[in-house]
Structures are given as C-alpha cells and as structure tokens.
C-alpha cells in the first residue's frame, strides 16, 4: 500500500478565515512533506518533517503553520491567506530523509482564497 | 535558476511506439533522480528512479537512462499506451543531507494517440 490521503479535496476560504489541511499515511514512513503547486508549474517544497520534527522550512510565510501530531499525520494550518496562495497543496511521505528513497504523494487539496 | 529542465513542453506519440522524455540538470551534487506521472487534479505518481551509481534502470515498460557526464536523463516508455497520456515530471535530489528535497522539472505533456 503506497497511499497518502489528504482532506479536504477542495477548500474555498476567505482571507480572514482559519482552516487546516490534513494528510495521513500508514506506510510507516518517518519523513513527511508539504509541497505547493501553482497552475502549469512544478511542485515546490514548503516543509519537511523528519521523525515528527520540522527539519526544513523553505522560507514559507508564517500564515502557513505545519504540525506533525504523530508519525502518520501531517497538518497544515492556514490563517490570513492571500489570493495568491491559491494553489494545489500536496502532501508526500518517504521512508526517511537522507537516503535514496522515493516520495509518495497524496491527491492534493485544491485551495482557493477569495 | 532552473536546476532541472524539461525542454519539451509536449510530446505526441502513436500507440505502440516508443515515447522518449528528456530531462537535463545543472547541479552536479544531484545523485538521485525520479520520474513522476501526473494526471490533472491528482498528485504525482511515482514511476521509476535511478541512483547516480547506475546508468540504467528498468521496470516493465519504463526504462530510465542516466548520462552523468552530460547531466542528462531520459525516460523511455515501450510500448506506449493511451493510458500513459499525462504530464511527466523528472525530479532530482541530493541524498545524505537533512532533507530529501526534490527539485522538479517543468513537466512534459505526453499524448499517446490511439
């Protein structure tokens, strides 16, 4: 089983709202990732969690707040977003960081900020 | 600075023929390369990978070739099928560090004609 699940599939939020994106994997992976993908662009890394600890923040604005409650779950808390934050948000997982291992992606959450 | 480039935005191939997708990179520190396939509104699906210690890796209809001296890799799909029609991303990473950050190319849209 190489499944990563993400909820919700679609999200529309206003600039003053607070919402959360959720990601789950049951492959025993210890590295989890958030990527952002704009239309007709490649995915871009936002955050990396390794063994439930944040190891990389790619200079993401503080209106995006990641959280890793346990080894299977990854959340992305959203607050005071801007319309330019509208994108497909992808979660991924891999066995560990530092080794040659593939990342498995979820289906993504399509976020629209109005 | 685009470290991973896919210079062909699109490719059209007849069913049953070979599809060849190309990817170039500039960072000589990259030592692990992956190909992903992506349908609209879905997350990328891992296809095949190759470590820099190899020059070829094969998995069913998919073969990836790596030419380190030219900093070039290619994905061969034989025979091509209509279900292969999707956007294909190559990605590269440097292992051994604190993150498995994937740098994606801009993608090639493959259309397999019946």
Image: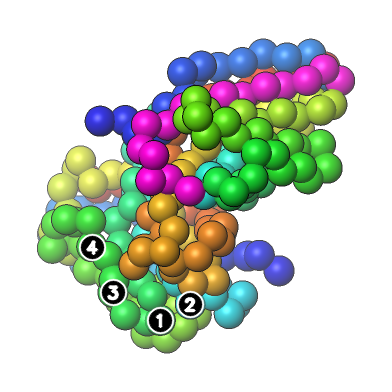
User: Which mark identifies residue A57?
Assistant: 4
Instruction: Point out the stretch of residues depicted in magenta.
Output: B16-31
Q: Are marks 4 and 3 in contact (CB under 8 Å)?
A: yes
Q: CA distance from mark 4 to mark 2?
A: 17 Å
Going from the N terminus, do you reach mark 3 or mark 2 first?
2
Q: CA distance from mark 2 to mark 1?
A: 5 Å
Q: Are marks 3 and 2 in contact (CB under 8 Å)?
A: no
User: Is residue A7 part of the magenta span, yes or no?
Assistant: no
Q: Residues within 10 Å of mark 2 (few under 14, many from 20)?
A: some
Q: Residues within 10 Å of mark 3 (few under 14, many from 20)?
A: some
Going from the N terminus, do you reach mark 4 or mark 2 first?
2
Residue indicated by mark 1: A51
Chain letter of the residue carrying label 4: A
**Same chain check for tags 4 and 2:** yes
Residue positioned 23% across, 56% down in the render: A58
- Helix or strand or loop: what does disc 1 sit on? loop
- Helix or strand or loop: what does disc 3 sit on? strand
Residue B16 in view here = yes
Residue indicated by mark 2: A30
Q: Are marks 3 and 1 in contact (CB under 8 Å)?
A: no
User: Which mark identifies residue A54?
Assistant: 3
Going from the N terminus, do you reach mark 4 or mark 1 first?
1
From the viewer's perspective, is B74 left or right of B6? Answer: right
């Amino acid at each position: 089983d190489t499944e990563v699940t993400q909820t919700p599939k679609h999200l529309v939020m206003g600039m003053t709202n607070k919402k959360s994106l959720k990601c789950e994997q049951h492959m025993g992976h210890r590295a989890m990732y958030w990527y952002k993908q704009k239309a007709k662009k490649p995915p871009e890394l936002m955050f990396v969690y390794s063994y439930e600890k944040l190891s990389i923040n790619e200079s993401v604005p503080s209106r995006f707040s990641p959280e890793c409650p346990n080894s299977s779950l990854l959340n992305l808390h959203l607050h005071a977003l801007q319309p330019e934050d509208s994108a497909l948000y992808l979660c991924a997982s891999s066995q560990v960081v530092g080794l040659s291992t593939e990342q498995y992606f979820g289906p993504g959450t399509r976020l629209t900020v109005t | 600075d685009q470290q991973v480039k896919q210079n062909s935005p699109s490719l059209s191939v007849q069913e049953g023929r070979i599809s060849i997708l190309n990817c170039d990179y500039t960072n000589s520190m990259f030592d692990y390369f992956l190909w992903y396939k992506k349908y609209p509104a879905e997350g990328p699906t891992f296809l095949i990978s190759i470590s820099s210690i190899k020059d070829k890796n094969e998995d069913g209809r998919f073969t990836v070739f790596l030419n380190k001296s030219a900093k070039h890799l290619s994905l061969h799909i034989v025979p091509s099928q209509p279900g292969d029609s999707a956007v294909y991303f190559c990605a590269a990473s440097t292992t051994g560090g604190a993150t498995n950050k994937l740098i994606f190319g801009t993608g090639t849209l493959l259309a397999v004609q019946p």
